[in-house]
Structures are given as structure tokens and as C-alpha cells.
Amino acid sequence: MAPNALGVVEASFARTKDHHTQWICLSAPNGRFFVSAEIAKPYRTPEILKNRRGSISRTLGRVPTAVVISGYVGVPVDEDYVFSRNLGQMKNLAGKRILLIGCGTVGGFLAQQLAQSGAGAHGGKLLLVDDDTLQGANLGRHLLGAPYLTWNKAEACADFLRLQLPHLDIGSSPTSITKQIDILGRYDICVDATGEEALSIALNEHAVRRRPDFPPMLYVWIEGNGAAAVGFMAHDPERACFKCLKVDLAGQKRFRLLRDGVEVEAGRNLACGDAHYIPFPVSRAASAAGLACDMVLDWSNGDERHRWRSIAMDHRRAIEIKDGNPDLIVRCPACGNEPT
Ligand SMILES: [Zn+2]
């Protein structure tokens, strides 16, 4: 794991004049190790310890038994340990190629949760895509804070997560996914955390056209000022696509989480340059991210039973709907095959 650490135990003896024991702390990607090293008795000759002290590391390195290691204490931080210890019997996301579109409030927390579940470990890849920049207006409900102001959100999240979990292969792209839509097909799963319905519809159309050789698409969004969160995974051509959830653009949603009469309140422009936004607390974004992370973990473990899931977070404004796996709608303009 740490090729640079080879020979450092032997080399440590060259740094002192006449001792034959050393305490050494090794820091490597897979752990920290505190060891006591001692030159074995037959090698404690004045010739080795004093006269040829300068070349002692080479002398000791030639004979595997010349240095005895004891008093060993290790603290593991390797990939298998870090990303598996919290999952019990569940598999982590190591080895998977995961594309996350949108690194806003939901996407930022989701990127972190996916990374902490092993996305990008062991030859896997986590790519974050967002063409927006982090602004002061975001600080109250984003994973990142002041150090990343004016950064591109995807690049900032990737930078932050690489710092926290250096094991992982996390990439970023500041280009809108609509300008590079063909990359979707190169991943094992694609997650749309933008919460932008028009974009989700476009991604869904692209995915449906390329079936059956196309990865699962997971959409996650928040409804009614954080009253509820929804996660929906589309993959199976026999089941609902994203458009099947609301066949008519101006029509009703198939699963109506918001109670009758609940209106979505848009944000007032409190600051100059603060674009149109929907107010909801950070807690709702973190819960939505958690819902999506659970769905990715279930997919990774072969469980795709509940592809439509929701959490009602404000019970005065939203109702509970059972999780399920909705059927396709024959007259769906994206995936349906109703004769025209
Ligand atoms: Zn459909």
C-alpha cells in the first residue's frame, strides 16, 4: 500500500549514532502503525553499529531477520475496513461506476453519502456533474461552506470528498449534462439529483430510447417546500419510466403526496442576484439524499423491489404513500406503445 515505506525501518537506524532500538510510526493509506524495531543480536557488532553506521540501512535490508519488529500497534483505515464496517451484511459501492448529476443541496449530501458507502473505491468511479457555482445563498443548506464560495459545485464537492476520503476515485465535470448526455451510458447507475423536472424528462427520454442496454436511472427530488422527498428508479422496460409518473405535462401527478390546497411557496429575492428558489430547510435535503443513497445501496445489493419511495416529512402538508414498483402507462409519450 505504501511503496515509499519500504526500507524506512532499516533507514531509521542510520539517523542515530549507536542505538540498536527504534520506535517508528508509519503512516500509510491503509493505516497507521506504531512499531518497535530492534537490530537482532548477531548484527549488533561495532562494525555494523559504529564503523559502517552510514550504510546500516543497506546492510540490514539485505537480511530479512536482521531487524526484529515488536510492540506493534495498528489503526486500520484501508478501503475494505472503512467502507464495510458500517454496512453489516450489505455490500458497499466499491467497484461501481456511479454518475451523479446535480451537486446542489440534495446532490451535495448525496455525493458525500455515496462516497462514505464506497463509491469510487476498488476500481470504481464516482463522477459529479454540475455547471453551477456555489454562492453565499447556498451556504445555509449545502454540504460545503465558505472555503468553496464561487467554486463550481461539482469540482468543489469532488475536491472536498477527495480530501476527506483519499482512497476514492472521484471525478467532476463543470459542463451541463445536456451537453455530454452520451456519458450516461458508460456508468453502472446514473442519479439525477437536480430536482429540475424538465431535465429529468429529457434524461428519461434519452434513457428510454436506448433501452434495454442502458443503466438504471435514479431520480430524487423534494416536493412542497420540503414536505416530502421522492426517489424513483427507472430501468425495467416493463415498468414505469419517469414520464409514466406524470403523463400529461400540465396534468396531475400519479402519486400525489401533497395534501389538497397545499401550494408551493417560492422564495423572495432577499439578496440581489439570488435567483428564484424554493425555500425548505437543510434537514429535508439531507433526508432526500438519505433516501436516494438507500436506493443505490439496495440496487447494488440486487434489491430493486421498491423503485418508487417517498418520505413525508411535514405531515400537515404531505400524506404517506406506500413504497412500490409502479407499472408503465400505455399512453406514456416516452415509453408507452399505444398506437397513434
Ligand atoms: Zn413511461
Image (cartoon, helix red, strand yellow):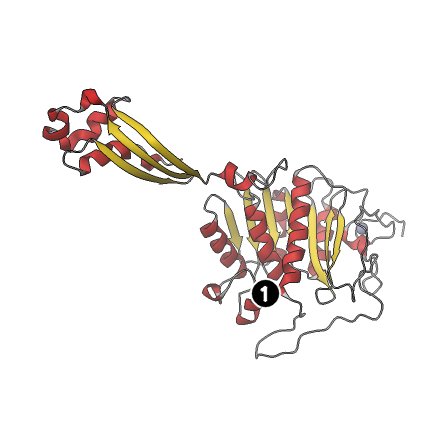
Residue name at image x 67 percent, y 75 percent: 267
Q: Quadrant of the N terminus?
A: top left
Q: Is residue 21 above or below residue 120?
A: above
| Badge 1 element | helix
The three-letter amino acid code for the residue at tag 1 is: Arg
Q: Which residue is mark 1?
A: 141
The front one of 162 and 98 is 162
Place of residue 153 in the rendered image (x, y in percent of width and height, measured from the top left):
53, 61
Residue 277 image-quadrant placement: bottom right
Residue at figure coordinates x 31%, y 28% from the top left: 69
Packing grade of label 1 (10 A; few <14, some 14-19, many >=20) is many
The x and y percentages for residue 155 are 50, 57
Q: Relative to 291, is 135 on the left or the right?
A: left
**Going by the picture, which residue comes out furthest to the front?**
71
Q: Quadrant of residue 305?
A: top right
Q: Residue at x 21, y 34 (%)?
A: 13
* Residue 7 in sight: no
